Image (tube, rainbow, N blue to C red):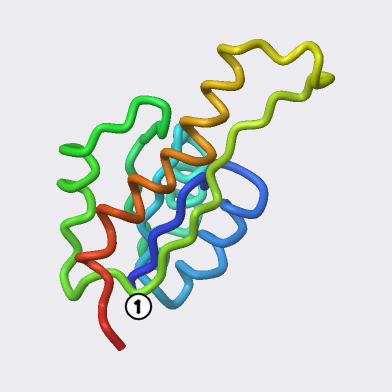
Amino acid sequence: MNIVITGCSRGIGLELVKLFSQQHNVYCLSRNIAPIEKYKNEVGDSARISFLQFDFESFDIVELNSFLTIENGIDVLINNAGYLVNEPFGQISESNLRTMFEVNLLGPFRLIQNVIPLLRRG
């Protein structure tokens, strides 16, 4: 299977990479790729991991489409990336709100639209 996961640098995203890469091809999209590189180096050739440093805030469709040229298509898409502002509601700036909107709503929306033609029917 070919699995695309966003937000892979820590937490659930990184754990999903570790779990799925044992038996499947995993394509990681993450702002911070250092933890993915570290894990891939630790396990060596046994992990089937490809990664792209990618930020939903500055969505680069050309770069994304180049990375997602996956033989046999995509079987699973896991949208895990997110942006959290840990402030009281009254203190959240409009700039932070716009970033949350870009990363948490528009980013996955754009990604899904671009991945739909690549999804395997089945």
Q: Residue at x 42, y 27 (%)?
A: 57
Camera-side residue: 49 or 118? Answer: 118
- In the figure, residue 104 lies in which quadrant? top right
Quarter holding the C terminus is bottom left
- In the figure, residue 107 lies in which quadrant? top left
Q: Please state the total of marks drawn on the protein image.
A: 1
Q: Residue 114 at what x, y percent from top left?
A: 25, 53
Q: Residue 51 at what x, y percent from top left?
A: 35, 47
Q: Residue at x 44, y 77 (%)?
A: 23
Q: Residue at x 80, y 21 (%)?
A: 89
Residue 70 higher or lower than 89, as above or below: below
Amino acid tagged 1: Met
**36 sits to left or right of 1:** right
Q: Residue at x 52, y 23 (%)?
A: 99
Residue 30 higher or lower than 101, as above or below: below
- The residue lying furthest to the bottom in this view is 122
Q: Residue 68 at what x, y percent from top left?
A: 22, 54
Quarter holding the N terminus is bottom left
Q: Residue 8 at what x, y percent from top left?
A: 52, 47
Determine which residue is flagged by label 1: 1
Camera-side residue: 119 or 97? Answer: 97
Identify the secondary structure beneath mark 1: loop
Residue count near mark 1 (Cα–Cα under 10 Å), binned few <14, some 14–19, many ≥20: some
- The residue lying furthest to the right in this view is 88
